[in-house]
Image (tube, rainbow, N blue to C red):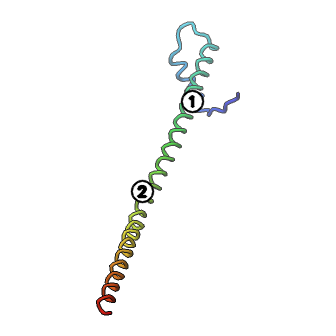
Amino acid sequence: MNNKVSQETQEQALKVAKGTQKKGQTKEQTKLIAQGVEKGIAEYKKQQSKKSRERDKDRKQQIKKKERLVDEPVELTEIQSSNYLPWILLGVSWLGFIGYILLS
């Protein structure tokens, strides 16, 4: 598993490893610590990248949801106004029947 880690990350890891270096610690041990820190930094960056993608996905979903909510009331008012049409037609037909019976 050959992970490509940036030079900056390697330098940061080595700096941290040297900063925590104990007396009598060999170069190999320091190098191993630096590699561990490097892996930790790489893992942290992956997690942050994943979180960033998730936040972006959630943000896009929120935008779509808001757009749907803005469009939805217009459709509801059209549906609500069309709900009166059957009642109006029913009333007109009853008036027509009553008028027909009274005039005949």
Residue that sits furthest to the front in the current view: 104
Q: Amino acid at mark 1?
A: Glu
Image point 61% across, 22% down: which residue? 35
Q: Residue 85: give x, y in percent of width and height.
A: 38, 76
The residue at the far top in this view is 24
Secondary structure type for disc 2:
helix
94 with respect to 11 (left or right): left
Please tell me which residue lies in front, 67 or 88.
Answer: 88
Q: Nearer the viewer, residue 87 or 53?
A: 87
Query: Where does label 2 land, which residue?
Result: 66
Front-lying residue, 13 or 56: 56
**Is residue 85 shown above or below 4?**
below
Query: Looking at the figure, which quarter contains the N terminus?
Result: top right
Name which residue type carries label 2. Lys
Marker disc for residue 29: none
- Spatial CA distance of label 1 from label 2 is 35 Å
Which image quarter holds the C terminus?
A: bottom left
Q: Mark 1 = which residue?
A: 43
